[in-house]
Image: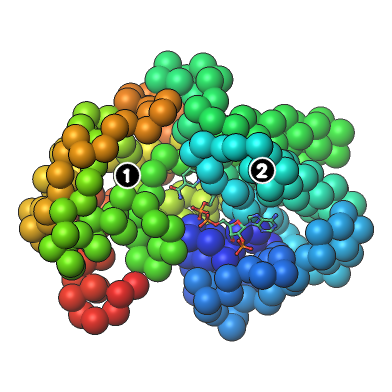
Amino acid sequence: MVTGATGFIGSHLARSLADRGDEVHAITRPGSHHSVLGDERVTLHEHDGTTRHLVQIVADVQPGAAFHLASLFLAQHGPDDVEPLVRSNLLFGAQLLEALSSARVLYLVNAGTSWQHSRDGQYAPACLYAATKQAFEQLVDFYVLRDGLRATTLKLFDTYGPRDPRRKLIAALRDAARTGEALALSPGQQLIDLLHVDDVVRGFGMALERTAGLPEPRHERWALRGERHSLREIVAIFSRVIPTPVSFGSRPYRPGEIMVPWEADCDLPGWQPTIDLESGLRRLLAADADGGRT
Ligand SMILES: NC(=O)c1ccc[n+]([C@@H]2O[C@H](COP(=O)([O-])OP(=O)(O)OC[C@H]3O[C@@H](n4cnc5c(N)ncnc54)[C@H](OP(=O)(O)O)[C@@H]3O)[C@@H](O)[C@H]2O)c1
């Protein structure tokens, strides 16, 4: 069972599970963007928002394991964002944990974020989104202690790859390369870890194997780190693949900009990235040139 399967990473994960022959069930909600997933092999279950309904869905499906990737990401928030953040990142997750517990599903792989941590690994949420991700981990701990759940939280940094519906840096660079219009950027000294989505998906698969092999109830936390560069270096690598006009310093750093991300020393055991940034970007841009704006 996959939550967040209509999002960037979740859709890649759901397709990859279906590719290897797994029966995949996705929890969606009214208004979910099904086009990102676009795979008829994945059975969709539209959740009405209540705990009872999610308990019923999980009881009917009886999944062997769950991947929890549903989340609302906001780098900054205002008063109107508090409820959506808590609803997506805490309430929905709590409902899922309760439903897994009721159906005696023992294995969970959850997506966390590097933004929960300062450079040295302390808990230091960069924003309310990161605080809600931390709070969800605490809920997972409860179900581990009470119900014997085996869980792994994989903490992600920035990611990129095909079929990415998010309007983030790589999408903005692709647009600038295509239109020739200079992309306004900050001064560009901040460090960013970028990981190709195929490496992320492989990490989730390995995390499930590891979780299923845990001899006792436990909640493990690991990082999936990508290739770390300054924004300026990333633009230089991108421009080696396709010349891209940008204007550094045309906009300020974001309030609370993370200049040096978490220096995690807890990569998922046995996992390491296989796609270097330049090759990953070449692959992505070749697909664009091919006509498929993936
Ligand atoms: N991508 C990254 O670089 C990155 C970095 C750090 C951490 N992460 C974590 O990795 C996970 C996946 O990230 P992503 O970038 O793939 O996310 P994304 O593209 O923004 O997709 C978010 C997904 O969550 C679903 N969702 C949100 N609220 C929901 C709710 N209340 N009920 C049901 N579904 C809900 C969305 O469904 P709808 O279609 O209904 O909106 C969508 O499928 C998230 O947990 C995120 O925090 C990602």
Residue 194's label in the rendered image is 1
Task: Indicate the secondary structure of the residue bearing disc 2.
Answer: helix
Which of the marked residues, 1 or 2, is nearer the chain's N terminus? 2
Q: Position of residue 269 (x, y in %)?
A: 46, 37
Task: Indicate the secondary structure of the residue bearing disc 1.
Answer: strand
Residue that carries the numbered disc 2 in the rendered image: 80
The three-letter amino acid code for the residue at tag 1 is Leu
The three-letter amino acid code for the residue at tag 2 is Asp
State which quarter of the image contains the C terminus.
Answer: bottom left
Q: Position of residue 204 (x, y in %)?
A: 52, 51
Q: Is mark 1 within 8 Å of ligand 1?
A: no
Label 1 environment density (alpha carbons within 10 Å; few <14, some 14–19, many ≥20)? many
Name which residue lies at 16% across and 59% down. Answer: 181
Q: Nearer the viewer, mark 1 or mark 2?
A: 2
Name which residue lies at 48% across and 60% down. Answer: 8
Name which residue lies at 11% across and 45% down. Answer: 236
Q: Could you tell me how far apart the alpha carbons at marks 1 and 2 are, in whole angstroms?
A: 30 Å
| Residue 61 seen in the current view | yes
| Above-or-below relation of 101 to 118 | below
Label 2 environment density (alpha carbons within 10 Å; few <14, some 14–19, many ≥20)? few
In the image: residue 39, left or right of residue 214: left
Name which residue lies at 77% across and 45% down. Answer: 91
Q: How is the image coloured?
A: rainbow
Q: Position of residue 267 (x, y in %)?
A: 43, 34
